[in-house]
């Protein structure tokens, strides 16, 4: 018997995605940065940065939740999340420009170590103590590096979603496939029953013929 496929798409556990884990770090890191280096009142940048970080993370969550029934919604939400972190990166870069602080590149002596640290660490525990001790320049460059890593991961995940959609389609295609599969299964079962019925009819006919032959033989023996 054919196994029924579900109309619902199998979704990943977003908490296991590395770019989601890095997004959680960015939310908390941004909160620390704003509290330490931006005015408590009168600066809209604080709300903008915190909102951009939270939006990036939450859209991963919402996209994952929507994925079960809507590939289109998942793609849109994940892409919005990516855009939010791009906006956050711009805010950090603007801070460096306004305060005439350097954006670290591969020529900077500490850039390689920062890159390695951000690449392998996805949990807040690795960043927590550093967040309270780093300077604004160091914290900015750490957040920017995380934003770059997260952006590349977003890009790769969006390509994965595109490939999955191309191969499996959306919920309409899955509903059609499941319905078609169900009909095919019913047709196959009906054919099995029909074949079994024909076999039984033939077997009954054979038994009747054998019974008639047996009766005729008994009658012949009685006459003799």
Image (cartoon, rainbow, N blue to C red):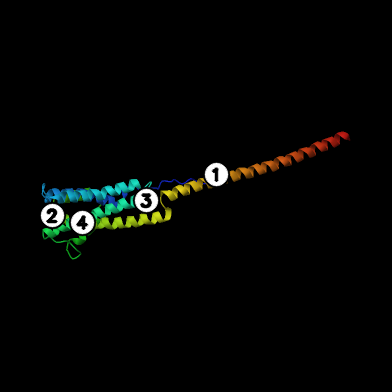
What residue would you read off at disc 2?
A: 136
Q: CA distance from mark 1 to mark 4?
A: 56 Å
Q: Residue at x 18, y 50 (%)?
A: 48
Quadrant where the N terminus sits is: top right
- Which numbered disc flags the more N-terminal residue, 1 or 4? 4
- Which numbered disc flags the more N-terminal residue, 1 or 2? 2
- Residue 14 lies, in percent from the top left, at 32, 48
- Residue 192 lies, in percent from the top left, at 60, 45
> Are the residues at dot 1 and dot 3 in contact (C-beta closer than 8 Å)?
no
Q: CA distance from mark 3 to mark 4?
A: 27 Å
**Where residue 103 is drawn, which disc sits there?**
none
- Residue 181 lies, in percent from the top left, at 50, 47
- Which numbered disc flags the more N-terminal residue, 2 or 3? 3
Q: Residue at x 16, y 58 (%)?
A: 94
Q: CA distance from mark 1 to mark 2?
A: 67 Å
- Which numbered disc flags the more N-terminal residue, 1 or 3? 3
What residue would you read off at disc 1?
A: 186
Q: Residues within 10 Å of mark 1 (few under 14, many from 20)?
A: some
What residue would you read off at disc 3?
A: 71
**Where residue 89 is drawn, which disc sits there?**
4
Q: Nearer the viewer, residue 183 or 206?
A: 183
Nearer the viewer's eye, disc 4 or disc 2?
4
> Are the residues at dot 3 and dot 4 in contact (C-beta closer than 8 Å)?
no
Q: Residue at x 22, y 59 (%)?
A: 115
User: Farthest residue in the bottom direction?
Assistant: 107
Quadrant where the C terminus sits is: top right
Q: CA distance from mark 1 to mark 3?
A: 29 Å
């Amino acid at each position: 018997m054919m196994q029924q496929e579900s109309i619902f798409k199998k979704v990943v556990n977003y908490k296991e995605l590395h770019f989601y884990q890095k997004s959680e770090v960015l939310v908390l890191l941004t909160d620390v940065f704003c509290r330490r280096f931006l005015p408590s009142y009168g600066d809209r940048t604080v709300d903008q940065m915190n909102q951009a970080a939270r939006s990036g993370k939450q859209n991963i969550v919402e996209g994952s939740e929507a994925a079960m029934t809507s590939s289109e919604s998942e793609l849109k939400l994940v892409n919005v999340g990516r855009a939010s972190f791009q906006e956050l990166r711009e805010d950090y870069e603007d801070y460096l420009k306004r305060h005439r602080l350097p954006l670290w590149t591969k020529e900077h002596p500490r850039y390689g170590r920062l890159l390695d640290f951000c690449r392998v660490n996805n949990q807040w525990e690795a960043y927590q103590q550093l967040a309270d001790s780093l300077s604004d320049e160091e914290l900015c460059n750490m957040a920017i590096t995380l934003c770059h890593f997260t952006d590349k991961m977003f890009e790769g995940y969006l390509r994965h979603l595109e490939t999955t959609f191309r191969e499996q389609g959306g919920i309409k295609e899955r509903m059609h496939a499941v319905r078609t599969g169900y009909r095919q299964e019913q047709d196959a079962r009906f054919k099995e029953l029909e074949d079994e019925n024909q076999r039984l009819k033939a077997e009954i006919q054979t038994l009747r013929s054998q019974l008639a032959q047996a009766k005729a033989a008994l009658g012949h023996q009685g006459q003799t």
